Image (cartoon, helix red, strand yellow):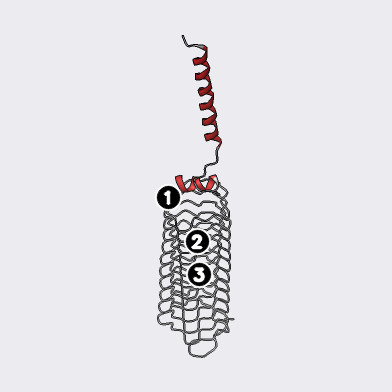
């Protein structure tokens, strides 16, 4: 049997151990002074679903495969981050900084990226369906083979973008700056590009059926073998554009400016050229 003193001694240390363990469990998950538990959780486990990480900075970190589904990431800094195959589905990334970030194969479906900065970011093969990019900066970004079906990109800045074979069906890019963008082989069927600046853009072999290009600037754009059937190019500017072998069947080019445009072997059955400025300087005839 234990003596009274020995029993008291053991009970004292048992109590002390319990207090110590409890303090560990209740302590904030911080390894760096000032960092939140959510920040440390993301850095250590690469998983922080529906976390509040607004204004935090993860610049330059390797967060490939991270799960940030539904996270609140307002003005969060992910510049130069490795975020390949990461998930930002339904996340709030308004004003987020993602310059030169690698988001190859990332899932940003239904995410909010209004006014976000993705200059030079790689979004190759990324899932961007239903994503909101209104007012975002995607200058010189890599979007080749990305899926942007029904994405919203009103007023987006994406000049010099690479979007080869990208899917942009039903995407709203009204008034977007797409100068010199490379969309070769992309699917833009049903997209709205009214008022967009596509001067110098490469749109060869693109599918642009039923696309709205009302008042769009396509000066010096390359549209060789593009399918523009049933598209609306009313008052579009196509000065010096290359449309060789393009399908313009049933397209509306009324009031368009085709000065010096190349239109060799164009298919233009039932095309509306009413009041258009034709390549040879003549005025397009209006059908009665």
**Disc 1 target residue:** 65
In the displayed structure, would residue 260 be above or below residue 79? below
On-image quarter of the C terminus: bottom right
The x, y position of residue 103, in whole percent, is 44, 58
Q: Earlier in the sequence, mark 1 or mark 3?
A: 1
Q: Residues within 10 Å of mark 2 (few under 14, many from 20)?
A: many
Residue 273 in the image: x percent, y percent?
54, 81
Identify whether 246 is placed above or below 1: below
Q: Residue 187, image x and y in percent? A: 45, 65
**In front: mark 3 or mark 2?**
2
Q: Label 3 belongs to which residue?
A: 158
**CA distance for labels 3 and 2:** 14 Å
Q: Are marks 1 and 3 in contact (CB under 8 Å)?
A: no
Q: Position of residue 68 (x, y in %)?
A: 50, 49
Can you name the residue that lies furthest to the bottom here? 281
Pick the front one: 44 or 218: 44
Secondary structure, mark 2, is: loop
Looking at the image, is mark 2 or mark 1 earlier in the sequence? 1
- Residue at which label 2 appears: 98
Is there a contact, CB below 8 Å, between mark 2 and mark 1? no
**Residue 233 vs residue 46: left or right?**
right
């Amino acid at each position: 049997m234990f003596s009274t003193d020995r029993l008291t001694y053991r009970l004292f240390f048992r109590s002390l151990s319990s207090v110590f363990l409890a303090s560990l469990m209740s302590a904030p998950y911080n390894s760096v002074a000032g960092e939140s538990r959510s920040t440390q959780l993301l850095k250590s486990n690469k998983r922080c679903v529906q976390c509040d990480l607004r204004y935090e900075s993860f610049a330059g970190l390797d967060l490939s495969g991270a799960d940030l589904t539904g996270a609140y990431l307002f003005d969060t800094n992910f510049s130069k981050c490795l975020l390949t195959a990461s998930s930002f589905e339904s996340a709030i990334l308004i004003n987020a900084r993602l310059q030169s970030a690698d988001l190859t194969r990332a899932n940003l479906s239904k995410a909010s990226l209004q006014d976000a900065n993705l200059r030079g970011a790689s979004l190759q093969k990324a899932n961007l369906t239903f994503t909101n990019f209104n007012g975002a900066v995607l200058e010189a970004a890599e979007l080749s083979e990305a899926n942007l079906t029904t994405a919203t990109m009103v007023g987006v800045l994406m000049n010099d973008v690479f979007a080869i074979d990208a899917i942009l069906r039903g995407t709203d890019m009204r008034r977007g700056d797409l100068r010199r963008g490379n969309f070769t082989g992309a699917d833009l069927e049903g997209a709205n590009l009214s008022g967009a600046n596509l001067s110098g853009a490469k749109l060869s072999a693109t599918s642009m059926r039923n696309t709205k290009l009302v008042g769009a600037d396509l000066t010096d754009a390359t549209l060789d073998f593009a399918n523009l059937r049933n598209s609306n190019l009313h008052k579009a500017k196509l000065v010096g554009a290359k449309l060789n072998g393009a399908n313009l069947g049933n397209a509306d080019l009324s009031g368009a400016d085709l000065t010096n445009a190349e239109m060799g072997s164009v298919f233009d059955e039932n095309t509306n050229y009413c009041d258009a400025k034709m390549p040879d300087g003549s005025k397009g005839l209006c059908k009665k």
